[in-house]
Amino acid sequence: MAIDYIYPDYEIIRNNDRCIACRVCERQCSNEAHEYLSDSKKMVSDDAKCVNCHRCVSLCPTRALKIVQSDHTFKINANWDGKSIKEIYKQADSGGVLLSSMGNPENYPVYFDKILINASQVTNPPIDPLREPMETRVFLGPKPDKIERDDKGRIKKNLPPHIMLSMPVMFSAMSYGSISYNAHESLARAARELGILYNTGEGGLHEDLYKYGQNTIVQVASGRFGVHKKYLSSGAAIEIKMGQGAKPGIGGHLPGKKIVGDISKTRMIPEGSDAISPAPHHDIYSIEDLRQLVYSLKEATGYTKPVIVKIAAVHNVSAIASGIARSGADIIAIDGFRGGTGAAPTRIRDHVGIPIELALASVDKRLRDEGIRDNVSIVVGGSIRSSADVVKAVALGADCVYIGTAALIALGCHLCRSCQTGKCNWGIATQREDLVKRLNPNIGYKRLVNLLTAWQHEIKEMMGGMGINSIEALKGNRLMLRGVGLNEKELEILGIKHAGE
Amino acid sequence: MKEGMFRNLSGCAISGIISKSGNRFSGQRIIDSIAVMHDRSNGLGGGFAAYGIYPEYKEYYAFHIFYDNKTAKKESEEFLEEHFDIINLSKIPTQKIPEITDEPLIWRYFVTPLPTKLAESQLDEREFVARCVFRINTAIDGAYIFSSGKNMGVFKAVGFPEDVARFYRLDEYEGYCFTAHGRYPTNTPGWWGGAHPFALLDYSVVHNGEISSYDANRRAIEMYGYKCTLQTDTEVITYIIDYLHRKNKLTLNEICSVIAAPFWSTIENKPQKEREELEFLRYAFASQLITGPFSIIVGFEGGMMALNDRLKLRSMVVGEKDDMVYVASEEAAIRVIQNDLDKVWSPKGGEGVIVLLEKGKI
C-alpha cells in the first residue's frame, strides 16, 4: 500500500560489465535479494530485501557488486529526518515496538576518541617492548584480607578465588541462541589459546563446550536459563547479569524462531517459545537481595569461584557499584550504552544508559573515595573497538575490558544490525544450519586469536612508550591521559587534564 | 606557583652513609660527598636526613616544622599542645648565607603524645603521630611538618645541597646515618616543603628518578589514609614504604619484591616456596609496584636501604669499608670521603641493599 511504502535505505549496485552471472550472490543471500532471470540470462537484485551485510559483495568473484546509501530523500529537515519519519510509518502500520540489533548507532559523543595517551621522553626513558619484558598479565578478584605467615615467617600464598588473564581483555556475554554454536565454539577455543575467558551469556552452556570450562564465565541472568549445579561448577567464574548496556532496565529477548533443537535443550525451555527474560531478577529487588544471591552461588560452588555482577551504565552507577562492592561480589562488570545485543527495543537501545568512559571514571573514583576499590575488580565494555580503547580504559581505572561486537566482527560480522531476523549470512547470529556452517570454528577461533594477539602487541608498544612495563602500573594512572575538545565538566568527571596542561 | 600545585619532575643526585656499629660521625662527610655531585643538581633543592642526632631526646619525636607566618605557628602550637607533651622547643639553628634566601620560620619540637589523648584515640602511638602530622600539614595553612621521627631529623631548603648544609650547620651534628639529595627540577619550586628528602615518622626517602606509575600509586595509596599534597614521586614512595612496613608488617626484602617486583618470567623459574611468596606479593600489592626509573635510599630507625628499579635506569654505587657502608649516585662521591674501600659494586636492578645496625632489629 502506498501509505506505508518505505524506499530501501540501501541499494545494490551491480556492474553489469563485470557480472558473469555465476549466481553465487543468489545462493549466498539468505534474504533472497538476488535472482537469476533465465530468459534474459541476467542477475537482478531487489534492494528492498538487502540488509547491507556484504555477503554477496565479499564473495563476488569479479567485484561486480557494491552497496550504497540510497539517495532517495525526504525534504531536508534537521528535526524530522528520514529515519524519524519512516519509524512512524512502521509503527502506524504494525502497532509494534521497534526492534533493533547491535549497539547504539546514534550520534552521541565517543569519549575514547577525545582522550589522548602520553609517552615518555627525556626525563624518563620509554621502554622498548621488543627487547625488554613487557607484562600484560592481570588478576581479577579482591585483595586478600590479611597476610598469613608459616612458622618460619614466610608468607603463605592464601589468595581468594580469582581469575588470571594473559591480557586485560575477555569476550563479553553473548548468549547461545542469539549467536550460533559455531560462534560459541570459536570464542571458547580462542579464549583457551589466548589464556583469557569468554562468557556464556544467558543461554546456558552447551554440553560439548564444558571441556573449555576453565576459560568460561557462566552467566546467571534473570531468566535463569540453563542454570543448574553442574553448570555453575563448570566455569572459572560466575556472572550475575543484572543488566546490559544495550537495554538497561529490561531483560534479554530471544525470538521463538531461534529457540530450536540444542538451544531449547540448553536453555531448558520448549522449542518455539519466545525467551523473554524478566526485567529484574524476581528474587532481587534490593541490594541485600543481591548479596543473598551472591552468597547462594558461592555456597553452591564451595566458595571456589569468583562471582561477577554485571550492570548497565546508568545515572547512579557509582552508588550501585558501591553497594555491589560491599555485597560479597568479587568483580563488577559495567556495560556502557554502546553495548551490543541480539535484539532490543530501538528506543531503549538508543536513549537509555550512559557512556562507559564516564561511568568507569565515576565508579573508580567513588570506590577509591570510599576506600573499597580493593574489594573488587572492574571490567568494562560497550564499546571497546581497539587496543587504544583498552589502554585508555585501564588508565581510567579498569582492571580489564569485555569485547563483544569487536569479537563478532573478527568472526565476519559486518554490522548490518539484522540479528533479530535470525538470517545472519555470516553464520554468527543465526540458528539455521545451512547458515551456521558458513562459520568454520577452525578459522573463526584463529581470527579471534589473531585479533587479540595484535592488540596485545599494540598495548605493549603503547605501554613501553609511556615507560611502563607491567600493566598494573597503568591501572587508574589518569595522569597518562589528556582530553581534547572536552568541556570542564567532562574533564572533571573523567578525572583527566586537558591536553596542554 | 607553590610546590604541590603542579607536578615537578627532576633528575638528581643522592648519597647515603651508615655506620653498622652505630658509631656517630660528623655531618661533614655527607656534605663532602654530595658536593662532588654538584653538576647533577641545578640549585633548586637540596636536603639531608640524619639519624642518631638527638641522643639526649631519643625517646621523643622530633618535629621539624616550616611556618610561612606567625599565625601558622600559633595555630600549630595550639594543636600540638592539645595532643602532645612538648618537652622542648626552639628555632633550628641556622646561619645566614647569601646562597639561601626566602627562608620560612623553621622550628623544632621534641614531643611525646599526651597519654589521655592517645588512649582516647584508640590508635597505636605511631599511627597517632602520623595522623597528627597529616592534620597539621593539610588543615593548617602555611604550616608544614617536614620531619617527625625519633632521634632523627631532616634538613632541607631551596639551594645546592652543600649550601643547604652550611645554612643548617649540618657539620655540627653527629649521627650514625646520613642521607642527602640534590635536585634538578624542571620547574621552579617556590616552597621549601617540596624539597627532598621526604619523611614520615622515622622513614626518609631520597630519590633520583621519575616514576611512570605515579598516578596509579598515588590513587591507590590515598585510599589508606595518606594524602599526597606535594605531587612528587618521593612523597608517594615514602607513603608506600610506610604502608608496607608499618601497616602491613612486610620485611624490607618483601618490600623490595613489591615495589621492584621481579618479572613473571623470573618468578616462574624460582623454587616453589619463593615463587608462591612472590606471586602472593604481586597479587596483593599490585598497586604498589613502581615502574619507571628510580634510585632510592630509605633511612629508618636502625638502618638504611638502597634500591634501584628493576630495569636499572638510574645509577647507584655501593662501597664498604670496615663497618661503614656508602651509597651514592656516583662512585666519585664515595671515593672523595673514603678512597680505600674493601668492596665497591653496582647493585642489580630490583635487588635491595639492606644495611641494619648490628645491635638493632627491624
Image (cartoon, coloured by chain):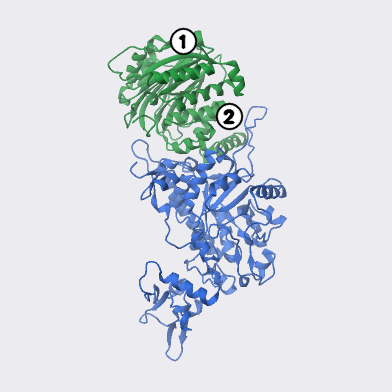
Chain colours: A blue, B green
Nearest to N terminus: mark 1 or mark 2? 1
What crowding class fits label 2: few (fewer than 14 Cα within 10 Å), some (14-19), or many (20 or more)? few
Q: Nearer the viewer, residue B132 or A450?
A: B132
Q: Amino acid at mark 1?
A: Arg
Figure label count? 2
Q: Which mark is residue B2?
A: none
Under tag 1, what secondary structure? loop
Where residue B82 appears, x then y in whole percent? 53, 18
Q: Nearer the viewer, residue B325 or A294?
A: A294
Up the image or down, B353 lies above or below A333; here it is: above
Residue of label 1: B24
Where residue B240 appears, x then y in whole percent? 50, 30
The CA distance from mark 1 to mark 2 is 31 Å
Q: Which mark is residue B248?
A: 2
Q: Nearer the viewer, residue B22 or A276?
A: A276
Where residue A263 appears, x then y in whole percent? 65, 67
Q: Are marks 1 and 2 in contact (CB under 8 Å)?
A: no
Up the image or down, B120 lies above or below A300; here it is: above
* One can see residue B261 in this view: no
Q: Chain of mark 1?
A: B
* 1 or 2: mark nearer the eye: 2
